[in-house]
Amino acid sequence: MAERTRPVSAPTPKTPAAATDASTARFELPAAGFALVELFESLPDVTVELEPAVANPDDHALLLVEADAHRAVDAALRSSPSVAAVERFGRDEHRARYRVTWDGHARRVIRRLVAEGVTLTGLHGASGRWKLRVVAPDRAAIARAYDALEDLGCDPNCRSITTFGDEWAHSAGVTDKQYQALTRAFKLGYYDIPRDVTTGELATDLGISHQALSERFRRAHKGLIEDAGVVL
């Protein structure tokens, strides 16, 4: 049977110990639930990333925007009701950096998240949707953040909640069995050049068929790429 991962619509309860650990969560929102609707409508292929070095949860953000039509990006950002001010910091053939000051609904969302005790550490926009990564001191704060997003009409989808520092192992795109296969393959030298183990030997080690291992790898690699924001 093919493995699947399903997003959860809202944060789910955990054991008391897990509930008090610092946690990270990934939320997905439509552009209308956060910001820059006009940009995604005018440039369907555009992607937007929050620069990690300045992923601070305040009214300002440094965005890396990837698109071919720079003038259209400039115009869409400056005309957006979710942006109060825009300053461009250079560009190359396909990408440009902008410092934006959030306004309107986007500003309310950012400030509400801060008020609920979470820190925005990642933001990726593509195809008219946003993926937000937040860190909180405990799962109660994650739940409050979700409720806040609902209250603000953001139509949130909670993709994953994990203990901080362990989110890769339980990524939104990777199941436990896929994670086991990837880590075992790495340990046995499957990813070395040249390989120290074949797929057949690895399948035998895991107690599954060669076909099942290939399918597990394919889905795991696809999930990791999607979760990293390379392809959405």
Image (spheres, rainbow, N blue to C red):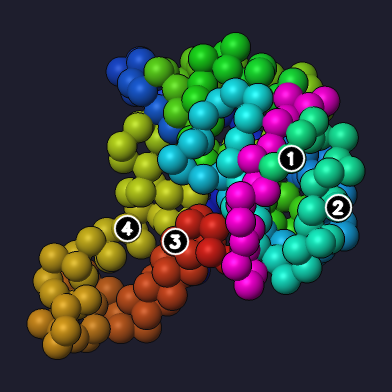
Of circles 3 and 4, the one toward us is 3
Q: Secondary structure at mark 4?
A: helix
Residue under label 1? 86
Tell me if label 1 and label 3 are in contact, CB under 8 Å. Answer: no
Q: Is residue 221 above or below residue 152?
A: below
Identify the amino acid type marked 1. Val
Front of the two marks 2 and 3: 2
Percent coordinates x, y for residue 124 in the rendering:
60, 49
Counting from the top left corner in percent of width and height, residue 31 is at 78, 44
Q: Spatial distance from mark 1 to mark 4, Cα to Cα? A: 41 Å
What residue sits right under mark 4 in the picture? 179
For the residues bearing labels 2 and 3, Cβ distance under 8 angstroms: no
Is residue 182 on the magenta stretch? no
| Residue at x 30%, y 83% (from the top left corner) | 210
Of the image marks 2 and 3, the number of the one nearer the N terminus: 2
Identify the residue position indicated by label 3 in the image: 224
